[in-house]
Image (cartoon, grey):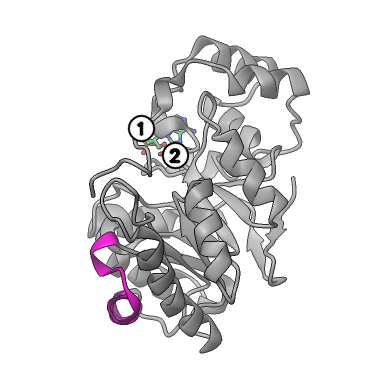
Amino acid sequence: MKKHFELNNSIKIPSIGFGTWLIEDGAPCYNAVKTALNAGYTHIDTAATYKNEASVGKAIKEVAKREDIFLTTKVWNTDRGYNQTLEAFNHSLKLLQTDYVDLYLIHWPANQSQFDNWAEINSDTWRALETLYEQGKAKAIGVSNFLTPHLEALWKDAKVKPMVNQIEFHPGYTQEETVKWCKDHNVLVQAWSPLGSGRILEDPQVIEIANKYNISVGQVCILFALQQDVLPLPKSTNPERIALNLEVGDVQLTKQEIELLKNIQTTGFSGLNPSEVEF
Ligand code: A2P
């Protein structure tokens, strides 16, 4: 298994990250991140809106050396725009108990169904990320949930091109058009909910593949992302599964299996369309 992906600014990013969405602040998040770090994760993904940055920061401070960890956070939708984003970033840094992040993302695009000037709003927010990048406070910058119209509009205005696009991606929901655009433009795709938030783990076709290789269904989903050069961010609060999700070993799914997994039922889909969401 590849240990790192390389971003378009040559920074190396550990190829599996620990996701923290919906892990409650306080003991649950602190314990989960601590367990993940002890299990060998060196890449942790959080966001201002997860409201658990303080627990993530505390766990990293206690268990790891900051420089050994690749830490991502994201600016939430209510903080869009140049000045507000800079303020939100400083607030995140305080909670995370650090003076830089490895990756800072725009969490969702301002979209067409909410704003006439959505492209301008996204470009203003992006300028703040460029400033943070130039100041060295964010070692890499990128976006999340951007579809091709959002990417194309941003691309035209951006001095620094996004290094990452973090999107929903799992068996049954692979956003082929967006992934292709990102690959063509050297933007690394990260997968949120790589296990379909646990909803595809009962799928008989996924179970059959897991049984064939004697691995877990979670590991099948992680391999499914990695083999398509997509960086998975699995999350779990269960110590055994936290460790298991990092240990995918040398199994190689076949091309046919990847195709089959792409086309399983969309049970895992969150139902969130970034061009239409109202938050
Ligand atoms: P748990 O915390 O009990 O392990 P996703 O990363 O796609 O959002 O999925 C996360 C969900 O999948 C969580 O509910 C988590 O529950 C569950 N999960 C994580 N890893 C595994 C695994 N290897 N096998 C089964 N369920 C898993």
Categorize mark 1 by other alpha carbons within 10 Å: few (<14), some (14-19), many (20+).
few
Categorize mark 2 by other alpha carbons within 10 Å: few (<14), some (14-19), many (20+).
many
Name the foreground residue: 151 vs 250: 151
Q: Which residue is mark 2?
A: 193
Specify whether tag 2 is near ligand 1 (CB below 8 Å). yes
Tag shown at residue 270: 1
Name the foreground residue: 102 vs 144: 144
Quarter holding residue 27: bottom left
Q: Residue 65 in the image: x percent, y percent?
A: 52, 77
What amino acid type is highlighted by mark number 1?
Ser
Task: Report the span colored magenta.
Answer: 77-95
Count of numbered badges drawn on the protein: 2
- Labels 2 and 1 touching (C-beta < 8 A): yes
Quarter, ligand 1? top left
Q: Residue 92 in the image: x percent, y percent?
A: 32, 74
Rendered view: 140 above or below 118: below
Name the foreground residue: 37 vs 158: 158
CA separation in Å, label 2 and label 1: 9 Å
Rendered view: 63 above or below 227: below
Q: Is residue 38 visible?
A: no
Q: Residue 69 in the image: x percent, y percent?
A: 54, 69
Residue at screen point 44% across, 49% down: 145
What amino acid type is highlighted by mark number 2?
Ser
Disc 2 or 1, which lies upstream in sequence?
A: 2
Q: Residue 278 in the image: x percent, y percent?
A: 23, 45
Tag shown at residue 104: none
